Amino acid sequence: MIRHWLRRLLYRIYLRLPWWRFIRRLALRHYGERCAVCGSRHALQVHHRVYRRAGRSVLWRERMADLQVLCGRHHRAAHGV
């Protein structure tokens, strides 16, 4: 099994790939470029609501239902930070 630190490193690399930038733009447009919690249009981030579906990673296979647009404050809150 992949160790936690390696999984995090691979995820950070994934977030820099053109594929993720494309999916991120699609999600922002799909959800109206507003935070799902407060409606803010500032510092928007796309949050993975789930990382696994049916026992497999959703990376490279994201559905819009897997994603949520959040402002930075609510994204941190979603991760418990």
Image (spheres, helix red, strand yellow):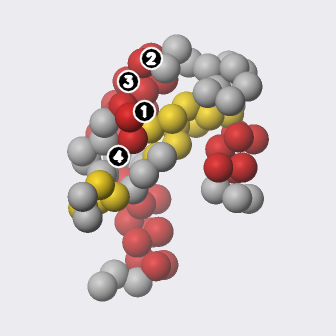
Measure the C-alpha gap from mark 1 to mark 4.
Answer: 11 Å
* Labelled disc at residue 8: none
- Residue in the image at 36% along x and 31% along y: 64
- Residue in the image at 34% along x and 58% along y: 52
Badge 3 density bin: few <14, some 14–19, many ≥20, Cα 10 Å? some
Image marks 2 and 3: residues in contact by CB distance under 8 Å: yes
Q: Position of residue 44 (x, y in %)?
A: 62, 30
Measure the C-alpha gap from mark 2 to mark 4.
Answer: 19 Å
Image marks 1 and 3: residues in contact by CB distance under 8 Å: yes
Q: In this figure, which residue is indicated by the disc labeled 4?
A: 17
Measure the C-alpha gap from mark 3 to mark 4.
Answer: 15 Å
Q: In this figure, which residue is indicated by the disc labeled 1?
A: 24
Identify the element where label 3 is drawn: helix
Task: Locate the C terminus by quadrant.
Answer: bottom right
Question: In the figure, residue 11 lies in which quadrant?
Answer: bottom left
Q: In this figure, which residue is indicated by the disc labeled 2?
A: 29
Q: In this figure, which residue is indicated by the disc labeled 3?
A: 26
